[in-house]
Image (cartoon, rainbow, N blue to C red):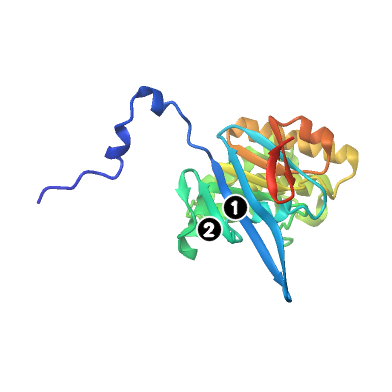
Amino acid sequence: MSKSPSVSSPQAAPGPQASKVPQAALRLDKVTRSFSQGREVLNVLTGADLAVNPGEIVALVGPSGAGKSTLLQICGLLEKPTAGEVRIGGISCGQLSEDRRTLLRRDHLGFVYQYHHLLPEFSAAENIVVPQMIAGIGRKPALARAAELLAKMGLSERQDHRPGQLSGGEQQRVAICRALANRPKLLLADEPTGNLDPNTAERVFQALLDLVRGEGLAALIATHNPDLARRMDRIVTLREGKVVAA
């Protein structure tokens, strides 16, 4: 029996000019998010549009309570929008099953939060190995990837230390390595230096930028720090539920 054409063959039809257009790592189209509070409805997002391209680092700024964390949760497929479309690497996520959303998060997304959330009983290297083994990577290559990332973060001599033996800045650098362990296409970071003193925050943020640029992935980073925001490729502001150019 003859085989039907592969699903990729129709995509070869566009001409050379169309093929040069990169697929956005993240795209939001008219995303809304509302919450019910008794008889009232709180509209956090009211039609947010955003595109983040491969290799681009975008700062997300806005006042406390503007909805930055909600937006990042939606981008990370941890929360569903009330309306609108979220696309990760060109994949429309609205109708995906929970299993497919979980796989997409595992294979395409990395997360860095304000608090490191490291597993206290494991070493720095083991914290980076765990998500790789969950993704089906063998222990030996997972350890090699952990050592590679820790070296880039200047933590080679700390790889066998547990989180309780590390400083706050070192813990957050390990958390960044863990987020990049599975070579995601998109990094989402929510105030990744918010719990650190200014000097430590500066070192950790520079290490984050260097590692993200070195890995060549896209990143959307929420921050309250205007100095840090200006060092990224582009700044967008969440204002009245919409994403606008800063």
**Amino acid bearing label 2:** Ile
Label 1, secondary structure: give it.
strand
Residue that label 2 marks: 134
* Position in image of residue 137 (x %, y %): 49, 51
The residue at 83%/40% (across/down) is 225
**Left or right: 11 as drawn, with respect to 224:** left
Residue 37 occupies quadrant = bottom right
Nearer mark to the viewer, of 1 and 2: 1
Label 2, secondary structure: give it.
helix
* Position in image of residue 62 (x %, y %): 78, 45
Residue 159 is labelled as none
Furthest-bottom residue in view?
38
Camera-side residue: 89 or 129? 89
Q: Residues within 10 Å of mark 1 (few under 14, many from 20)?
A: many
Residue 31 is labelled as 1
Camera-side residue: 177 or 96? 96
The residue at 33%/30% (across/down) is 14
Report whether residue 183 is seen.
no
**Left or right: 5 as drawn, with respect to 88:** left
* Position in image of residue 63 (x %, y %): 82, 48
The residue at 59%/61% (across/down) is 82
Q: Is 157 placed above or below 104 here?
A: above
